[in-house]
Image (cartoon, helix red, strand yellow):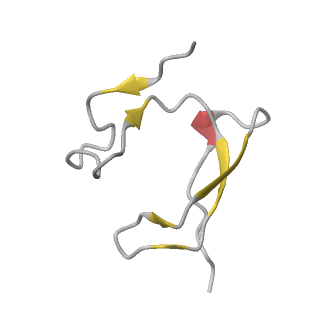
Amino acid sequence: MLHLGIEQNPLNEGGPPAGARFVRPELVCEVAFLEWTLGGEIRHGSFQRVRTDIRAADVVRERLIQ
């Protein structure tokens, strides 16, 4: 079994929210969600699938162009 859990926040922004855990960013998954919060968190996220066609190092947050 692959163990990706880590204790330290990789973003250096404090601890995880209640019930959340940090993991090493090695896998990429597709997530559907309602919106981004003002704090930069995903609201109502839902796992869709693991993406094997994208490297974790290539993932960036998409920006809405207005």
Q: Is residue 64 above or below residue 5?
A: below
- Residue 12, located in which quarter of the rendered image? top left
Which residue: 29% across, 52% down? Answer: 17
The quadrant in which the N terminus is found is top right
Q: Position of residue 14 (x, y in %)?
A: 20, 47
Residue most extreme to the left: 14
Residue most extreme to the right: 53
Taking the image as shown, residue 19 lies to the left or right of residue 30, namely: left
Taking the image as shown, residue 22 lies to the left or right of residue 50, namely: left
Taking the image as shown, residue 52 lies to the left or right of residue 14, namely: right
Seen from the viewer's position, the closer of residues 63 and 38 is: 38
Residue most extreme to the bottom: 66
Total marks shown come to: 0
Which residue: 62% across, 87% down? Answer: 66
Q: Position of residue 61 (x, y in %)?
A: 56, 58
Which residue: 64% across, 38% down? Answer: 28
Residue most extreme to the top: 1
Taking the image as shown, residue 49 lies to the left or right of residue 17, namely: right
Seen from the viewer's position, the closer of residues 19 and 61 is: 19
Seen from the viewer's position, the closer of residues 32 and 26 is: 32
Q: Position of residue 46 (x, y in %)?
A: 62, 57
Q: Position of residue 32 (x, y in %)?
A: 66, 61
Q: Is residue 4 above or below residue 29?
A: above
